[in-house]
Amino acid sequence: MVEESFTVMDNIKLCEGVYKMTLMPSSGYAQSIKCGQFMAVEVPCRQDSLLKRPFAIYNYDEEKRQISFCYKVVGKGTEHLSRVEKGQALRGAYPLGNGFKIDEGQKRVILVGGGVGIFPLYSVFKAYPDKVFYSVMGFKERCDVILTKEFEERSSELILCTEDGSMGEAGFVTEALRRNIERIMPDLMLCCGPRPMLKALKDVMRNYPHIPVQVSIEERMACGIGACLVCACAVRKNGKVVNKRVCRDGPVFSLYEVEL
Amino acid sequence: MANLEVTFCGKKFKNPVIAASGTFGFGREYAEVYDISALGGIATKGITLKRREGNSPPRIAETYGGILNSVGLQNPGVREFLEKELGFLKSHGTVVIVNIAGSTEGEYCEMARLISRSEADMIELNISCPNVKEGGLTFGSRPESIESITRLVKASMEGDMPLIVKLSPNVASISEVAVAAEEGGADAVSLINTITGMAVDVRTRRPVLANITGGLSGPCIKPIALRMVYEAYRAVKIPIIGMGGIMTAEDAVEFMLCGASLVQVGTANLIRLDACKRIIEGLEKYCLENGIKDISELTGSLITE
Ligand SMILES: Cc1cc2nc3c(=O)[nH]c(=O)nc-3n(C[C@H](O)[C@H](O)[C@H](O)COP(=O)(O)OP(=O)(O)OC[C@H]3O[C@@H](n4cnc5c(N)ncnc54)[C@H](O)[C@@H]3O)c2cc1C
Ligand SMILES: Cc1cc2nc3c(=O)[nH]c(=O)nc-3n(C[C@H](O)[C@H](O)[C@H](O)COP(=O)(O)O)c2cc1C
Ligand code: FES
């Protein structure tokens, strides 16, 4: 884990309001990154956005020493980041958090992502090239649909859905999952998405308690390294509810343990 | 080379920079980022007698030039702290200040007694936490209760461990509360804790923090903190630790000029992980450039006429 300066190699628009930024650490030294980890990026020169913004590491290229993350413009920090230009310098800390972990015996892995929740999932393809992946991706409408090609190329099957039915299957991603899970019967599920989706997912998975589900959780952060305790997530372990740090103990938790 | 060392309540600090309570955990995470033995001292996350889970999230909001937090004293409790965390902190050869918060006088006294028997260096009495309902600020807002809790805690401590009382800015007169701490027997005062505030999300029409209110910290509070350190310095004889919005070495010097012997750096650590280290380096440079041989010369040397 380091905090250092990066050079912006690219900051491209994926669709309206969603961008992909590629960074190269100025130190020239690339940290080793685990899939599902994240980085915290400083918003340059904004007195109303002093804290770094956490983003899942989307891809990392050890040879080129480049890291990329994808982000949706939702507020002032991301709005400002979207206007950052190639060649500019940005500060950030990485790699942070625990990441996804796939055990040896887990061969068939299903990825379930809702909206910008698909971003943390992409890095598992590269980290676990020997697994068989199934991807279920959900978006609001056609114009939000992104990165399907990237996921399709690396999955043995891709199920795409939009809430309004303008592309792929119609309805929520969790409903598409409900229709397909018995057929796929994965050994493991990795997921990320908004809270309502995670709640619905918990409900779908009630019938399949033997399938472990790892979920990447989002919470507002400050230090990003586990020291300030602002990023609490209630986790139930052995019947007791304790607050865990999303930035350090997470962002990946067992879906069955997090209190949503 | 300028001398950055400061002797404060009989304890030797390598330099006047202390990592502020609540922003530095128990040092473990920052130790992975840089060598924390460079610090003058470390003030721990606020410790309570029993383990606390803290408030519900969101616990953080941003405002112009600052942040609001409502962590609510999440900590493992004093016994687990002494067993599992203190040894690690002490192994870095930096002054360890244990920040404590209670909900009753009895809790404060029991913790102080336990810590005074440990290898910690100092206790910082947090009677100014705005984020817990019981205790905290209720002890820290009235001069009479500050004097009485300070006296009780001091009496329950064994040995000669110095006691720092951390003052709240959420009071009518900072000089009065500083004097109350001094009369209660405090060896030093530290100020300021966060200023109670709130943030609103106009899209959802809800407060940003689940706790509704939180403690404001960061650069936006510096002018208030400086004024309070300046007033406290003129009111008491015991030494002062100044804090509130310190981001750079220049900010730290401002606090020292207003009367602080040492400074704490809080929010800056969250923004730049190596903030304390950079401030220490900056202080060294400031002393060299300004012909200051001993950094303690700065304390209270503000020219006002
Ligand atoms: C571990 C982790 C990984 C993330 N990965 C991605 C990613 O790959 N791509 C992506 O687009 N977003 C990701 N996010 C969310 C992203 O951090 C926020 O969208 C971003 O910080 C908002 O910044 P802002 O200044 O634009 O918004 P602000 O103006 O600060 O707030 C606007 C809105 O964004 C929400 N928000 C603010 N901070 C966070 C936060 N830390 N987590 C969740 N929501 C927040 C708030 O609810 C608020 O309504 C991730 C969050 C976490 C915790
Ligand atoms: C996230 C956070 C947690 C804090 N927790 C504590 C605490 O447990 N005990 C305490 O005395 N002060 C606590 N504080 C207050 C700081 O120690 C400090 O007094 C205050 O933030 C002002 O300094 P700053 O502007 O440099 O942050 C906390 C501050 C922040 C930002
Ligand atoms: S953001 Fe500081 S502990 Fe997680």
Image (spheres, grey):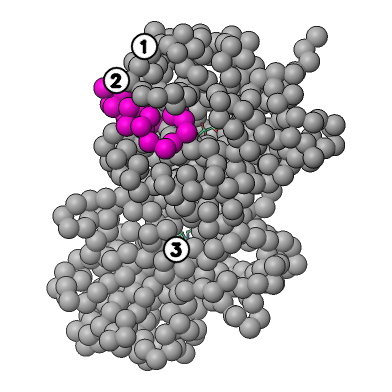
User: Which residue is at a point 30% across and 59% down the rendered structure image?
Assistant: A196
Q: Is residue B127 above or below residue A10?
A: above
Q: Residues within 10 Å of mark 2 (few under 14, many from 20)?
A: some
Circle 2: residue type: Glu
Let me know if residue B69 appears in the view: no
Q: Nearer the viewer, residue B178 or A63?
A: B178
Q: Chain of mark 3?
A: A
Which residue corresponds to mark 1?
A: B148
Q: Nearer the viewer, mark 3 or mark 2?
A: 2
CA gap, disc 1 and disc 3: 44 Å
- Report in which chain the residue with disc 1 lies: B
In the image: residue A188, left or right of residue B267? left
Q: Secondary structure at mark 2?
A: helix
Residues rendered magenta in the picture? B100-124
C-beta proximity under 8 Å, tags 3 and 2? no
The verdict on label 3 being within 8 Å of ligand 1 is yes
Amino acid type shown at disc 3: Gly
Label 3, on which residue? A97
Query: Residue B34's x, y, as percent?
Result: 59, 55
* Numbered label attached to residue B105: 2
The reply to whether label 1 and label 3 mark residues of one chain is no
Q: Pointer 1 and pointer 2: residues touching (CB < 8 Å)?
A: yes
Picture residue at 35% right of the left edge, 43% below the top: B81
- Rounded to the nearest angstrom, the CA distance separating label 3 from label 2 is 39 Å
